[in-house]
Image (spheres, rainbow, N blue to C red):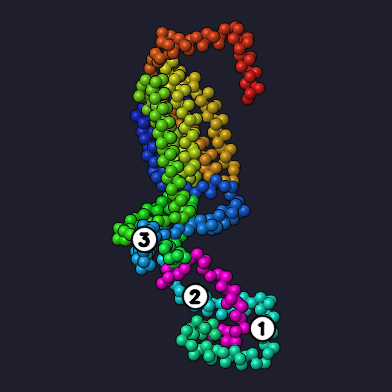
Amino acid sequence: MLKIYDILSKNKVIASLILFIFCVVAIILATGIHYEEDIAKFLPHNAQNEKYQDVYQRIALQNRIAVMFTAKNSSRTVDADSLENAMEMVGREISGSKLIDDLQVSINETKVFDIIQFVGQNYPYFLTESDYCRIDSLLSDDNYVKTQLEENKKLLMLPAAGMAMQNMKYDPVHLFSPVMKRMQNFQLNSKFQIIDGYLFSEDGKMSIITMNSKYGSSETHENGEIAEMLDSAIAKTQKQYPNIHISAIGAPLIAVSNANQIKSDSLIAVSIASVLILLILWWHYRKISDILWIGISLAFGWLFAIAGMAVFNDEVSIIVLGIGSVIIGIAVNYPLHFLDHIREVHDRRAALKEMIPPLLIGNITTVAAFLCLVWLDAQAMRDLGIFGSLMLVGTILFVLVFLPLYARQCKQNTNNDTGSFVGRLIEWVENFISTGATRRYVLPSVVIITLILG
């Protein structure tokens, strides 16, 4: 490190050029990486867990979204035609989107005939043991077939014989009627009804449109775009139908709302913490340049980590980056220690020589701890280990290679002068600790208490 410092200190232009080129390349790599928000990546990656994740995405309508239409004033009713028109308008606004699929504005009642045709063409596959016993019993009567054909003739003479004709083609003597009866178990829930081909509640006061998100409930970024699209469509429709209230609900939309709340709370917390940290740093250093160099060191480490992630993977979880922000508390120690040391040792080279061993040893042990996460089965945990390791490596490289070239040497801070209250307090504590009585009684007592309580 000292040889690198000796070379770069004589060629600061080359050092600045190297730093600039690296930052440009790192930014290009960082912009090319895909950021995702799938929390399932924190689960171990094996066949069984993949199966569980797939089931989780499918059960409980995890990707289902419903848009509900009701009267804005609950004391008044809205006619079914107005609700149907509002449903059609919302459907037209979102029908061309590539973010959703299985959009169901109205129910195609002609599909019932398709189901009957499919079942009729495959009756033998739906028969049970009891059905075969029933067929044997019916055919034991010599007049059964003749009687059923006579009944069919009478049935065809009725005005509403369309549905019967569909089934009659595949079961003219009604041997397989139990199969069709069992299909009634799949009929629409009694809490809903179909009016003019649209899905309504049992009392007819609410109508419903349903759709699926293509991204389940975990990808909050894409689901956020769906939420914005629905909000726009709902706003346009309510403007034309002011007496109708429209709302959307579903696991993907709830996930978006939760994610936005978390991001908002995190931003507030980080802002407050940043202000407090900056105040403490300002009180200690009294120089904006030192605070800026601390920030630049952390920014370089973060950029180094993102660029490294882009080399290993083409995507990274934003959740990992959020959790990785706590690594700043570790990485900030490197520039802090160096800047504090250079205030006491005015020779940059001497300060660097004294700081290299402790900083490198501390960095190696911490990086090794983060690299232990790489052997876990969970993809996100491996990413966290790589991100944390790279950020610490990037920060220590900047502190040991570039920071000594640019950080200005300064006099020792006068805040700890013995003439000030803080200086006198620090001097008293140092004198108290250094006395023989303290070393003989107080310090052993503190060690014993720590061992007992720890």
Nearer the observer, 130 or 221:
130
Q: Are marks 3 and 1 in contact (CB under 8 Å)?
A: no
The mark found on residue 35 in the picture is none
Nearer the observer, 286 or 365:
286
Residue span colored magenta: 169-198
Residue 348 placement: quadrant: top left
Q: Are marks 3 and 2 in contact (CB under 8 Å)?
A: no
Residue neighbourhood size for the residue with mark 1, other residues' Cα within 10 Å, grouped as few (<14), some (14–19), many (≥20): few
Residue at image point 37% right, 20% down = 286
In three-dimensional space, the C-alpha distance between marks 1 and 2, rounded to whole angstroms, equals 26 Å
Residue furthest to the front in view is 75
Label 3 or label 1, whichever lies nearer to me, is 3
Q: Is residue 281 above or below residue 48?
A: above
Residue 260 placement: quadrant: top left
The residue that label 2 is drawn on is: 112
Please report whichever mark, 1 or 2, sits nearer to the chain's N-terminal start. 2
Q: Secondary structure at mark 1?
A: helix
The mark found on residue 135 in the picture is 1
Q: Secondary structure at mark 3?
A: loop
Q: Secondary structure at mark 2?
A: helix
In three-dimensional space, the C-alpha distance between marks 3 and 1, rounded to whole angstroms, equals 55 Å
Residue 21 placement: quadrant: top left
Label 2 sits on what residue type? Val
Residue at image point 45% right, 46% down = 259
Q: Is residue 193 magenta?
A: yes
The mark found on residue 76 in the picture is 3
Q: Position of residue 177 (x, y in %)?
A: 60, 80
Label 1 sits on what residue type? Ile
Q: Position of residue 389 (x, y in %)?
A: 51, 36
Residue at image point 49% right, 75% down = 112
Residue 6 visible in the current orientation: no
